[in-house]
């Protein structure tokens, strides 16, 4: 197995929305805002080369939305999904599987593209299976009012219509949180483990992968950046913030006890970190680039 970090493109989000009830005087220490109160955000995917399978975890925003749409997100930098794949000698047609942690547009928008004539949408990975889970799929195609703007039909329905969509079996409920445990699916169809969490959105799936002797967890939106490590720092987009707190508390202690390496999808300036226990709770220990850690 070989892993590759894939930068699909950076953007900005409102700092207040990203930190919920935490005051700006606190969160700006780790995530400084510009004059519009926007903070730097990455859309960092992970590519897994495992035998004859090439698995991409999340695909970023993509590029098919309107200029007006992208105008809300202040894209910056030169990274693209295709450019990042090419850096390692791959093309999107080589991808055999696209695993989506969840179906918010900044995580799956790159899965679908315009067709050649720009008359309709089509899968951006023509040879890949698209993986989600049935509970989250239903949540996404029948969205609540709060998440409706994040679940875009043009990102979702073409996966199903193409016949390339498949579901992974995951736990039915998050009841395990009440027992001081989280729902780990140890044997997924893709050969890596999955942690299911429900605070951000229904049945978000976080891959955990043992690689070169280290336990790497792809954080998606449970802990988006290093600034979100302290327990109360829960993003305002979460649909069930108290559940996020419970899930995050259990995860943080497990991450320390089991020596997890935290892979950030949304931290534009930190790729990976470790955690440590302090008298004030679990905190950042060390940060690493992917190359520092694995090359």
Image: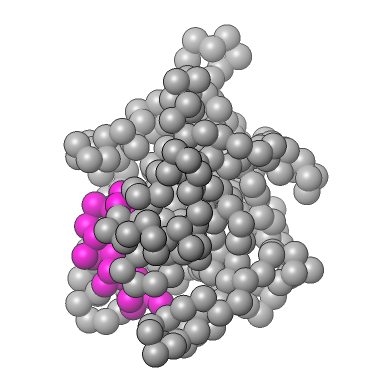
Displayed quadrant of residue 244: bottom left
* Residue at image location 22% in from the left, 81% down from the top: 179
Q: Residue at x 26, y 72 (%)?
A: 246
Horizontal side of residue 269 vs 103, given as left or right: right
On the rendered image, what quadrant is the C terminus found in? Answer: bottom right
Percent of width and height locating residue 100: 46, 48
| Residue 242 on the magenta segment | yes
Q: Residue at x 42, y 81 (%)?
A: 282
Colour pattern of the rendering: one colour
Residue visible at 31% across and 69% down?
232
Q: Is residue 187 visible?
A: no
Left or right? Give the position of 198 relative to 178: right
Magenta portion: prevailing SS class = helix
- The percent coordinates of residue 74 (x first, y second) are 52, 33
Count all numbered tags in the image, as a single digit: 0
Expressed as whole percent of the image width and height from the top left, the position of residue 257 reads 46, 87
Looking at the rendering, the stretch of residues picked out in magenta corresponds to 235-252
Quadrant in which residue 104 is drawn: top left
Residue sitting nearer the eye, 143 or 158: 143
Q: Is residue 169 magenta?
A: no
């Amino acid at each position: 197995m070989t892993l590759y970090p894939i930068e699909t493109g950076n953007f900005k989000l409102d700092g207040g929305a990203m930190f919920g009830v935490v005051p700006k005087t606190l969160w700006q220490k780790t995530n400084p805002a510009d004059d519009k109160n926007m903070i730097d955000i990455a859309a960092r995917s992970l590519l897994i080369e495992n035998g004859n399978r090439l698995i991409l975890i999340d695909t970023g925003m993509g590029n098919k939305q309107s200029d007006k749409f992208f105008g809300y997100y202040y894209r910056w930098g030169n990274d693209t999904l295709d450019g990042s794949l090419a850096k390692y000698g791959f093309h999107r047609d080589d991808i055999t599987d696209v695993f989506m942690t969840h179906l918010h547009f900044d995580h799956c928008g790159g899965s679908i593209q315009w067709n050649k004539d720009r008359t309709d949408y089509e899968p951006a990975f023509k040879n890949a299976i698209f993986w989600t889970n049935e509970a989250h799929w239903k949540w996404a195609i029948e969205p609540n009012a709060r998440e409706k703007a994040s679940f875009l039909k043009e990102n979702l329905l073409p996966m199903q219509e193409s016949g390339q969509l498949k579901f992974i079996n995951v736990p039915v409920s998050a009841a395990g949180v009440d027992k001081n445990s989280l729902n780990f699916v140890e044997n997924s169809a893709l050969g890596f483990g999955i942690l299911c969490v429900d605070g951000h959105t229904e049945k978000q799936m976080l891959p955990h992968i043992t690689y070169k002797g280290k336990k790497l967890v792809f954080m998606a939106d449970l802990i988006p950046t290093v600034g979100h490590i302290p327990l109360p720092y829960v993003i305002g987009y979460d649909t069930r913030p108290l559940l996020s707190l419970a899930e995050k508390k259990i995860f943080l202690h497990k991450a320390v006890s089991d020596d997890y390496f935290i892979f950030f999808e949304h931290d534009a300036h930190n790729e990976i970190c470790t955690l440590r226990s302090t008298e004030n709770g679990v905190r950042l220990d060390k940060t690493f680039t992917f190359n520092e850690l694995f090359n």
